[in-house]
Image (cartoon, helix red, strand yellow):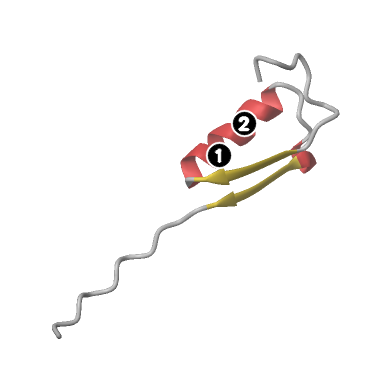
Amino acid sequence: MEDFDELNDYQVYCCGAPQMVDIAHLAFQAHGLPAEEFFSDAFTYANPLPKVAG
């Protein structure tokens, strides 16, 4: 965001941990990105499968 004064003519695609995506969404909007131009995929983690004795 330091490279651009305004983000009103851009789209942002953001992937990562849910908290990072939420913070990025707020930060980009604060720099002029329209809410409808923010696209994201927040990664959640599944519990590991139990190991099977073999």
* Residue for badge 1: 22
Mark 2 crowd level (few <14, some 14–19, many ≥20, 10 Å Cα): few
Q: Residue furthest left?
A: 53
Instruction: Using the rendered view, name the quadrant where residue 5 is placed.
Output: top right
Mark 1 crowd level (few <14, some 14–19, many ≥20, 10 Å Cα): some
Distance between the alpha carbons at the discs numbered 2 and 1: 6 Å
Q: Amino acid at mark 2?
A: Leu
Residue nearest the observer in this picture, 52 or 22 = 52
Could you tell whether 41 is left or right of 32 in the image? left
Q: Quadrant of the N terminus?
A: top right
Q: Position of residue 7 (x, y in %)?
A: 78, 25
Q: Residue furthest right?
A: 9
* Residue for badge 2: 26
Could you tell whether 24 is left or right of 36 in the image? left
Q: Position of residue 24 (x, y in %)?
A: 59, 33
Whether label 2 touches label 1, CB < 8 Å = yes
Could you tell whether 30 is left or right of 36 in the image? left
- Residue at image position (32%, 65%) is 47
